[in-house]
Amino acid sequence: MVHGHKRIFAFATVAALVATGTGTAHGGGLEANGYNWDLLFDPATFTGKGTITHVIINHDITNTGYGTGTVATSSNRDYYNFAGKGDLLDNSSCLVSVQNPWGSGTDRDITYAALTGQSARERITSTDLGLTCSYGFSMGAGTLSIIGGISGQQLNYEGDVPVTLTTTQPVSISGTGIGWRAGLAYEVPEIALRVSAIYNAAIDYNLSGTANLAGFAAPANADVTTPQTFEIKAQTGVAPGWLALGSVKWVDWSVVDQLSVDTLGGPLTTVLGYEDGWTVTAGVGHQLTEELTVLGSLTWDKGTSRRNAANVLENGTQTDRWGLSVGGAYKPSQNVEISGGVSYSLIGAGSNLQGETWDTGNVLAISGSIKASF
């Protein structure tokens, strides 16, 4: 059994990790899981955790200029996060992680895609393999840690490009890039206080692959930048067995204006028209028993589709999103923890200058995790 401030801090860590596992997946822009380095703060000497998330998106787009039916939908998707953390010395730790920070999926009516010059099917996936380390030293009542890390990241794009009103040809390109991060964290275990601020740098890619044109595979390529991010997270004990936590995240989505794939048949361009994204989360955790912890949180995610001077969306369909998340963690033994959660979000109704309209949509994310520590 863990006693004193170590017990409080262990509960706080459980609640914080449950919060990240039940976050409202499918954020603004092309965000999938985003970046998650929270296991770095786990108090165990060695710990490993795996999380799987399934996301169900209901966001149907219509355009009366092209008929009365649905012209585009967002695909369901799965994300993962696997990480292992170890304390190298009393004051330093390192985290190895594999996760999916970016991703998107859109399916369009083939005729609509052909008439508007878009892909009938688009999938963007990513894999981030990262190493993140911290070094801490005493400051006042707590510990100040310096955080730094590096990642190798892969980005993949697949599309089905209309060649007639009823047929398509596939495009597949991918590439790799190197990114880095830096931040600070301050912790006071006696009151379960932690404040962290981490900046993730932008990553430039040159994607290359093939586009099937006129029945043969021809070279295709694209230059893409995934955005820089900055996130502040805070938590503190507010009463015995209770923890308050919150976060604010900025993502530089305005750097992603369009995706243009160069092919022998000419460029294939998807206009994204993003503006910077903001995500704000606030929640509370409660330790029911030494084995069971529960948590609930609210999230607001700013719509990232750019607006003109008249406050009308220029392109895209990403409006503000409000979400509720609930989750829990159960420890069947001293060294094993099972957690999971559900989040439900509402996507605001809207329209854009392209004539596309949509009613209020929703996103349901279901996640499960297992963690082992020793």
Image: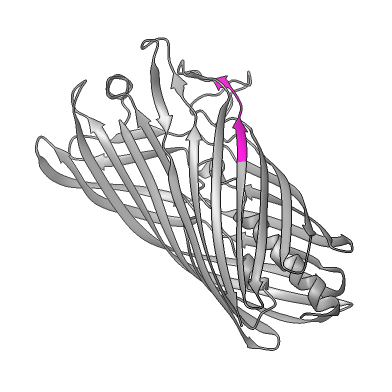
Total marks placed: 0
Q: Nearer the viewer, residue 285 or 185?
A: 285
For residue 139, what is the image quadrant? bottom right
Which x, y percent locates residue 358?
52, 20
253 relative to 152 in the view: left or right: right
Q: Quadrant of the C terminus?
A: bottom right
Q: Which residues are magenta?
A: 344-350
Q: Residue 54: x percent and y percent?
A: 48, 48
Residue 29 on the magenta span: no
Q: Quadrant of the N terminus?
A: bottom right
Q: Is residue 150 left or right of residue 337?
A: left
Residue 190 in view: yes
165 above or below 346?
above
Quadrant of the rendered structure where residue 86 is? bottom right
Which residue shows up at 55% across the image and 66% down it?
A: 370
Q: State the colouring used for the structure image.
A: one colour
Report the residue that reaches farthest toward the left.
215
Q: Is residue 224 left or right of residue 340?
A: left
Q: Main secondary structure of the magenta part?
A: strand
Specify whether residue 34 is in view: no
Residue nearest the viewer, comparing 249 with 293: 293
Q: In the rendered image of this protein, does residue 156 appear above or below residue 288?
A: above
Q: Whole-percent x and y of residue 127?
A: 42, 59
Q: Residue at x 33, y 57 (%)?
A: 175
Direction bottom: furthest residue? 89
Residue at position x 39%, y 15% in the image: 69
Nearer to me, 287 or 360:
287
